[in-house]
Each structure stands twice: as C-alpha cells, then as structure tokens.
Image (cartoon, rainbow, N blue to C red):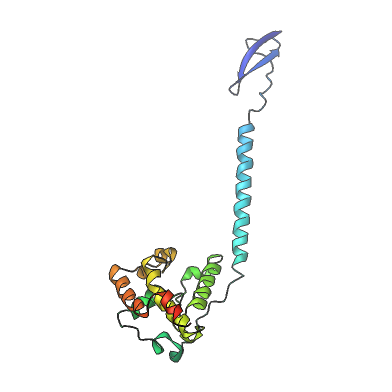
C-alpha cells in the first residue's frame, strides 16, 4: 500500500492504492471540481429564460395599442380665430408645441411600439386636454384662456416646455434665445398669470 498526495484537477487529494510502478492505482476526483462550471451554466439558463420571457411579453404588448388620433381641424375654433398670433410666433408654436397641443400631431415610428406608444399617446392626450391650439374654444372661460397664454413665457424660459425628453428626441423643437424672446414678447402682452386670473373676479 502507498499513501501519498496526488494532484488531481488542481487540488490535492489523499490517495490510497496498490503500489504498481510509481503511481497509485485509483484517484478519487476532488469534490467540487466542476462546481464553478455548473453555477455558470445555471446562471446562463436563468438569463436566457428571463430574456425569452421579456421577448414574449414585448410581442404580446404590441397587441394592445392605444388610439392615436388627429381630430379634424376647425379653423373657427383655433387659437388664431380668437387671438392675434404674430407671424414670427406661429411657426415656433407649431414646431415646439404642436405635437402635444394641437390636432396635427406627427406620430413617429416609435409611437407605434409598445410600451413607448402608451406613454406618448398619454402625453399627447394630456397636452390636448390642458391646452389645444386647434380647439381654443374648449377653454373653460376667457379668463382661463388668457391665463394660459400669459403662462407660456414662464414655461419656455424655465425649460418646462417643450419637455426635456421631447427636446432630446426632436431637435427641431429646441428654442433659441431669439425664439424665446419672440414668444415671451407675445405671451407677456396678456399680462402675468396672477393678473389675468384676477381680471375674471
């Protein structure tokens, strides 16, 4: 009998065997030799399952598409029919605000891909409900309409409008200092929002 330490798979094990030549007869493999490989394989299986589940969910999400609408434009109900808008300001409002505050929304390709389509449609509907340049008669009162016009300057100066994410996705919506000055010169002609609100009392 020969007792000694032998290297098997990079770990030391005590082997006992019959002395045949210079090597032990049998060597028991180290426990845990392939533990690391097994864990890696299991992790890869889990990752693949998660990815497959996400793909399946994404595919089924496409079946639930929101209603993207562009209601007909009635000129007599538009902002221009009720308020004088300078020619310099009109194109600024259209390219910076038109997609969410008018009935002429340009729906990009990604607005047809769920779940992004849900967010975009919700933003457009919310924007139209708050302020729609093509449905100016939907304002609750002339006082509210004037207040909304007066608040436009504050929104564009503070960077609240257009929203940051919209400016990132739509470079043409970014306003220069000249654009902001032109919009504010027009917007401030309606007075500060507080004064506008007070006019109705």
Q: Give 47 or 7, whichever is nearer the viewer.
A: 47
Residue 104 in view (yes/no): no
Residue at position x 52%, y 73% from top? 126
Please tell me whether residue 25 is drawn above or below residue 199 in the rendered image: above
State how many labels appear: 0
Q: Is residue 40 left or right of residue 172?
A: right
Q: Position of residue 19 (x, y in %)?
A: 68, 9
| Res 32 → quadrant | top right
Please tell me whether residue 21 is drawn above or below residue 182 in the rendered image: above
Q: Position of residue 95 (x, y in %)?
A: 37, 75
Q: Is residue 181 left or right of residue 76?
A: left
Q: Is residue 180 left or right of residue 77?
A: left
Please tell me whether residue 174 is drawn above or below residue 38 in the rendered image: below
Extreme residue in the top direction: 1
| Res 146 → quadrant | bottom left
Residue at position x 53%, y 75% from top? 125
Q: Position of residue 183 (x, y in %)?
A: 33, 75
Q: Give 137 or 58, whichever is nearer the viewer.
A: 137
Extreme residue in the left direction: 178
Query: Which quadrant would the N terminus be assigned to in this image?
Result: top right
Residue at position x 61%, y 70% from top? 64
Q: Give 173 or 22, whichever is nearer the viewer.
A: 173
């Amino acid at each position: 009998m020969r007792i000694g330490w032998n290297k098997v798979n990079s770990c030391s094990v005590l082997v006992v065997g019959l002395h045949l030549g210079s090597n032990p007869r049998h060597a028991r493999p180290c426990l845990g030799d392939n533990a690391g490989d097994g864990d890696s394989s299991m992790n890869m299986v889990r990752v693949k399952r998660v990815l497959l589940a996400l793909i399946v969910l994404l595919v089924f999400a496409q079946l639930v598409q929101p209603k993207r609408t562009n209601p007909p434009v009635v000129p007599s109900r538009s902002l221009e029919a009720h308020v004088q808008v300078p020619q310099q300001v009109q194109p600024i409002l259209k390219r910076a605000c038109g997609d969410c505050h008018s009935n002429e929304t340009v729906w990009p390709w990604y607005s047809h891909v769920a779940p992004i389509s849900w967010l975009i449609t919700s933003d457009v509907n919310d924007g139209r409900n708050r302020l729609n340049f093509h449905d100016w008669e939907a304002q609750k009162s002339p006082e509210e309409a004037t207040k909304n016009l007066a608040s436009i300057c504050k929104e564009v100066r503070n960077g609240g409008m257009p929203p940051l994410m919209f400016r990132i996705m739509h470079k043409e919506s970014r306003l220069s200092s000249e654009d902001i000055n032109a919009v504010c010169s027009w917007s401030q002609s309606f007075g500060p929002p507080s004064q506008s609100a007070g006019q109705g009392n």
